[in-house]
Every structure is written in structure tokens, then in C-alpha cells.
Amino acid sequence: MPLKLPTIIGHRGAKAYAPENTIESIHTAADMGCKWVELDVKLTKDSVPIIMHDDDLDRTTNGHGPVAQITYADLCHLEAGSWFSESFSGIKIPTLEEAIEVILARDLGVNLEIKPCPGREKETAEAMLDHLSQFWDDRDRLLISSFSHVSLEIAAEMAEDWYRGLLLESDPIPNWLELADYLEVTTINIDGRTAEREFVEDILDTQRMILAYTINDPQLALQLRQWGVDAMFTDDPDAVNETLFKPH
Ligand code: G3P
Ligand code: MG
């Protein structure tokens, strides 16, 4: 069965409304009607897969320094909400396992972006897939993506049946098609804020699905949908849904 994606995917949960990549953010996205969310996965020093975007703790927690240098035990003492708003103070950085529990409870699909700290491309993919295979069996509601070709190569080896997506920067590498073929990806995930129509058409010619990040401008969402983009990551599901799905 081909991968079925909703038009709107909550980015890091619902990043505009709750601290990104937290359990609360996943719940917020689900409450806003999202059927899928995108979450970033990286590893603690002792290789526990956690949901976190940055390589450093500073922006989204009360900790400091590289994520790759903190153990899971120490990470548990950090809080990840008050930087966003006092009303979220005290909330924690979730493990992959804790996030998946909520994904299952809320009946969501998930795009797990493998987001390795520098130099940990292989081990991050291996640990994530190893953990995930223990509690996930719904092929049709999972997309594994990464900017890292090494991580995607591991995903192709360890879980060849799970759908993969190749993430491209706003200035895409010239050999993206060769890589997409080699990595056998189902989706190409582009920066929709800078993409040109011709590039979207080049991807459509390959019969692959196109996902665009990170679309918070409802008018841009409309345009990308008209161009043939299949799904969009947004921090603000309410605003984009309202424009895309209101009767014209
Ligand atoms: O996966 C789409 C998007 O999340 C990629 O960029 O930096 O927000 O993880 P980033
Ligand atoms: Mg991401």
C-alpha cells in the first residue's frame, strides 16, 4: 500500500503553541486535528534516543552544552518548558519511547527525523531503529527521514520496509536524484519556503511524494499545494488548516 500522508503535519508537535518536541506539543497538535506529527530524534551520551532538535541543550532546556555529552540520568533533571512559557515549566525532554506511547495513544502517524549530533550519524540511526522496532509495527503510519545520508543508509539496511524520506536543504545537493534512487526513498522533503516550481516539477517527474518544510504562511501553503506538494510541515496547524480547508 502506498504511503498515505495528510496535507498537514505538525512540526515538532505544534511548535507555535507548545514547547517543541515535547509530549505536550504532540498532544497540542493532536488537539488541533493533526493526524501526523514530525519529531526530531537524537541520542544522549549513553545512546538513549530522545526527542530533541538542537545539538546543544541551551535553547530549549535549562541545561548547557552538547546533547552528546549528557547522560540520560542527568538529562532527566532538566526541564524543557519554561523557555517557551511559564505555563509549561517543569516538563521534560521525552525519550523516543515516551513519545511513541503518546503517538499510539492519540492514534497518530509520525515522521521521525533522524537528527544526529555531528559524528553520530550511524549510531543514532541504529539506536533509534533498534528501539523503535520493539514497539512500532504500523508501516503505513511511519516515515523515517534525515538530512544525513549515512543515517538513511542504515535505515535502508536495518528496516528496509519502512518508508524513508530524503531531506534536502534549501540549496539542494546537485545529485539529489541519484541519492534518492540509491537510498530508495519514497518522499523528497524540501524547504518549501525557497523552492521554485521547476524543482517541484522535477521531483514530481520522479513519481515520488513531496513534503515541504516549514510552512507557516497559509498563502504559501495554498501555492505549494497547487504545485503538487503532497504534505507540509507547519508550526501552526490551526492557521494553515483554516486556509487550506475553508470553503472558497
Ligand atoms: O523534517 C522537516 C523539518 O523538521 C526539517 O528541518 O531543522 O526543523 O528539523 P528542522
Ligand atoms: Mg525536523
Image: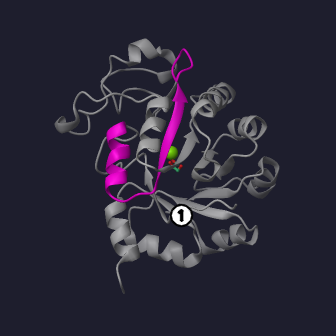
Residue 116 horizontal/vertical position (percent): 58, 32
Q: Is residue 46 magenta?
A: yes
Residue 147, located in which quarter of the rendered image? Answer: top right
Residue 13 in percent (x, y) is at: 40, 47
Q: Which residues are magenta?
A: 23-48
Q: Position of residue 191 (x, y in %)?
A: 55, 58
The residue lying furthest to the left in this view is 86
Q: Amino acid type of disc 1?
A: Ala
Q: Secondary structure at mark 1?
A: strand
The foreground one among 134 and 147 is 134
24 and 103: which is toward the camera? 103
* Quarter of the image that includes the N terminus: bottom right
How many discs mark residues in the rendered view? Answer: 1
Query: Residue 24 in magenta?
Result: yes
**Residue lying at 44% horizontally and 61% vertically, measured from the top left:** 215
Residue at 72% across / 39% down in the picture? 159
- Residue that carries the numbered disc 1 in the rendered image: 231
Left/right of residue 187 with respect to residue 105 in the rendered view: right
Is disc 1 surrounded by few (<14), some (14 to 19) or many (20+) residues within 10 Å? many
| Residue beneath the point at 39% across and 75% down | 245
- Residue 144 in the image: x percent, y percent? 62, 45
Residue in the picture at 62% in, 46% down: 145
